[in-house]
Amino acid sequence: MFDLLTAVLGAAALALAAWCGFAAYRDQPTKDWHFIGMAVVSLLAIVQLVIGIVRLAQGDDPRQGVAIFIAYLIGSACAVPVAAFMSLAERTRWGSATVTAAAVVLAVLEVRLYDIWGGVGG
Amino acid sequence: MAESTESTESAAAEPAVRTGLGQGPGRLLVMLYGVFTVAAASRSIYQLIARYDEAPLAYILSAVSAVVYAFITVSLVRGGEGARKAAMVCCAAELLGVLTVGTWTLADPSAFPDQTVWSDYGMGYLFIPIFLPVTGLMWLRRARQTG
């Protein structure tokens, strides 16, 4: 379950990165549709944070340690919302590029989270 | 008619107003430096508290890099000529740090039982640590010419 969510979130982050990267390439700022995309990805990240904490409370043990696990969960929940606010303030292609960078960072965080969780039974 | 001249005037005046270091391409740099500040800081805090004895040199270097990243992030956000100069010095120090630590980790791996952000020229972080100061210096140079 947790591994599946991690994979979905990683894929969604890459899709968001490609979408906003395309907008930056076409010299466009982020639009309403982009923000809806960011909201969906952010929501997934928050769901992951909640599920992660619930699993910890149920006694599951991440392979590389609880502290690192929680740090990465919080980081991945914050990445896209922070970039969204920055792109609200930057109404140029560079706002789109910023969201792209944050989405790539999120995808990397998901790969690391997969390792940290270590497949303790999904 | 008067309205259209006014709008062209304000459009022409806009670039002069936008001298902030953290705007345009600078916004992307603020984002990346922010990410690396958080990454290096959380990493070094955790390592210094939990496992200081294992690799003190690596962990102290992580902490130093976190401070450098934090300083550049704040300088970019604040803007102004003083901040721009300070950020340039820090970017140069960062580049020097990446090159030194990168060479050091390859030449004498035994000094670094654990990774830092700058190990192997930042390979564990997609080599971004070595591109970031170069991009930063280019942006800060350009910001002076236009601003």
Image (spheres, helix red, strand yellow):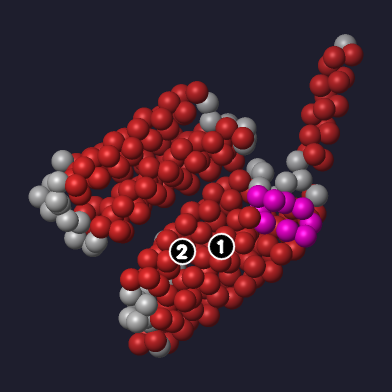
Which is more N-terminal, label 1 or label 2?
2
Chain letter for mark 1: B
Position in image of residue A28 (x %, y %): 58, 31
Q: Is residue A9 above or below residue A75?
A: above
Q: Is residue A25 above or below residue A111?
A: above
Provide the residue designation for mark 2. B40
Provide the residue designation for mark 1. B69
Magenta span: predominant SS is helix
The one nearer the camera, A19 or B46, is B46
* Residue extent of the magenta highlight: B75-84
Residue at 66% x, 53% y is B76
Residue type at mark 2 is: Ala
Can residue A11 be seen here?
no
Check whether the beta carbons of the residues at disc 2 and disc 1 lie within 8 A of each other.
yes
Q: Residue furthest top?
A: B1
Chain letter for mark 2: B
Question: In the drawing, does residue A34 fall left or right of residue B113?
Answer: right
Question: In the drawing, does residue B138 fall left or right of residue A56?
Answer: right
Q: Is residue A37 above or below residue B71?
A: above
The one nearer the camera, B92 or A118, is A118
